[in-house]
Image (cartoon, rainbow, N blue to C red):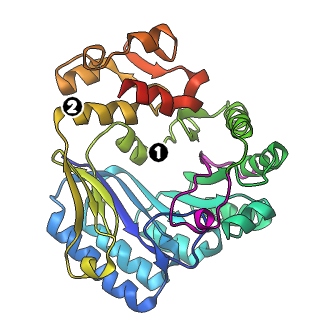
């Protein structure tokens, strides 16, 4: 049973150099047809469960006109919403205004995820984005005045030619905005992105590591609850925790991923197929062994790690029996403490190496 919903909006005003998500430039003619297809998909597949988390991402959902956004939000009225619903809407700084915020408030959106990424001019130039601190300060002040008190900011680092000093300045400015949540991303060069095609090179690995350590140290007062995510207590992303807890969820929209009834699926990225109702692109029936692997890969991203009792209840086998962990525990790559197994906080940066040894 799924109690969480992700909705993908593939439209953007412009394409960032590093982005490999399913997206294309906004076209008014396409939006109407897309929202009709999205409505049909939800009508066909939603099984009337009570929804605890709802996340509208992209792409850039805020690239739609106010009328289109209201049509999208009306579609979400199909969901049976929990009284404690966490409803997140991704928004770009340049789209943020009082009319949009009032509309989101009207439809119960209570969490904003604002894609700032950086205030550094060189970083923004590389990413082909724009952001201004004074503008951000005023707009977040506006959000607060209209009752939005759960705000995430995205920060990207390890950009080519970025220095530790650049990152420090960026992070200082982010903290002056007093967000409840910060998501951090080290640049990944994905095939088919402009940055990859232009043969962009990664920064020095040691500098990347120093940047990560600096972020962790600077945000020490916040709850570092997942590899790249920091929040004030009580403001952890409930929606993203569904992914990391390996729970089932709906994915609606072009290219959206979901996990239902033991099947992991990805919707088609072919726009014409999607409009015609040929929605599902790929399916994977996940057997018990694969489910346990996902549990480890996703669960160890959380700093608290994996609850051993929950793992036993879920799969009928102890995690220590399902996977050979003794050597990693002995080497202190993993910490086995009370009811949890988690990655040694000093080794989070080499998490992938540790996971590969487990899996």
Q: CA distance from mark 1 to mark 2?
A: 28 Å
Percent position of residue 140, x then y: 67, 61
Q: Earlier in the sequence, mark 1 or mark 2?
A: 1
Residue 336 visible here: no
The answer to whether residue 285 is left or right of residue 33 is left
Q: Between residue 94 and residue 77, name the one nearer to us.
A: 94
Residue to which mark 1 is pinned: 237
Relative side of 61 to 155, left or right: left
> Is any atom of residue 302 visible in this view?
yes
Q: Residue 337, position in %: x, y?
A: 44, 11
Q: Residue at x 42, y 46 (%)?
A: 240
Question: Callout 1: 10 Å neighbours few (<14), some, many (20+)?
Answer: many
Mark 2 lies on a secondary structure that is helix
Label total for image: 2
Query: Magenta span covers which residues?
Result: 176-201
Q: Residue at x 50, y 70 (%)?
A: 60
Q: Where is 30 relative to 333, above or below?
A: below
- Residue that carries the numbered disc 2 in the rendered image: 289
Spot occupied by residue 222 in the image (x, y as percentages of width and height): 63, 34
- Secondary structure found at label 1: loop
Indicate the position of residue 289 as horizontal and vertical percent values.
21, 31
Q: Which mark is residue 348?
A: none
Q: Between 105 and 164, which is closer to the camera in this rendering?
A: 164
Residue 192 is a magenta residue: yes
Mark 2 neighbour density, 10 Å: few (under 14) some (14–19) many (20 or more): few
């Amino acid at each position: 049973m799924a109690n969480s919903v992700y909705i993908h909006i593939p439209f953007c005003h412009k394409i960032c150099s590093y982005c490999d998500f399913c997206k294309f430039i906004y076209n008014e003619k396409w939006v109407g047809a897309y929202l009709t297809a999205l409505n049909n998909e939800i009508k066909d597949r939603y099984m009337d469960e009570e929804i605890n988390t709802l996340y509208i991402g992209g792409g850039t959902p805020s690239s739609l006109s106010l009328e289109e956004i209201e049509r999208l939000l009306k579609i979400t009225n199909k969901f049976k919403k929990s009284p404690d619903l966490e409803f997140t809407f991704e928004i770009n700084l340049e789209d943020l205004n009082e009319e949009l915020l009032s509309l989101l408030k009207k439809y119960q959106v209570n969490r904003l995820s604002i894609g700032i990424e950086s205030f550094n001019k060189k970083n923004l130039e590389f990413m082909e984005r724009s952001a201004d601190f004074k503008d951000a300060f005023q707009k977040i002040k506006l959000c607060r005045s209209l009752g939005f008190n759960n705000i995430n900011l995205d920060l990207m680092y390890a950009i080519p030619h970025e220095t530790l000093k650049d990152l420090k300045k960026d992070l200082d400015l982010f903290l002056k905005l007093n967000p409840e949540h910060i998501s951090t991303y080290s640049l990944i060069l994905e095939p088919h992105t402009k940055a990859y095609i232009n043969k962009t090179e990664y920064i020095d690995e040691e500098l990347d590591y120093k940047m990560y350590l600096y972020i962790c140290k600077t945000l020490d007062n916040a709850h570092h609850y997942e590899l790249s995510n920091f929040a004030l207590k009580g403001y952890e992303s409930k929606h993203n925790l569904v992914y990391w807890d390996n729970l089932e969820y709906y994915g609606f929209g072009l290219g959206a991923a979901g996990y239902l009834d033991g099947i992991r699926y990805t919707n088609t990225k072919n726009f014409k197929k999607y409009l015609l109702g040929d929605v599902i692109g790929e399916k994977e029936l996940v057997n018990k062994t694969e489910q346990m692997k996902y549990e480890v890969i996703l669960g160890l991203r959380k700093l608290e790690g994996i609850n051993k009792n929950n793992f036993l209840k879920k799969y009928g086998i102890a995690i220590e029996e399902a996977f050979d962990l003794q050597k990693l525990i002995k080497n202190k790559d993993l910490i086995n403490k009370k009811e949890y197994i988690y990655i040694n906080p000093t080794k989070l940066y080499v998490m992938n190496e540790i996971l590969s040894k487990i899996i």
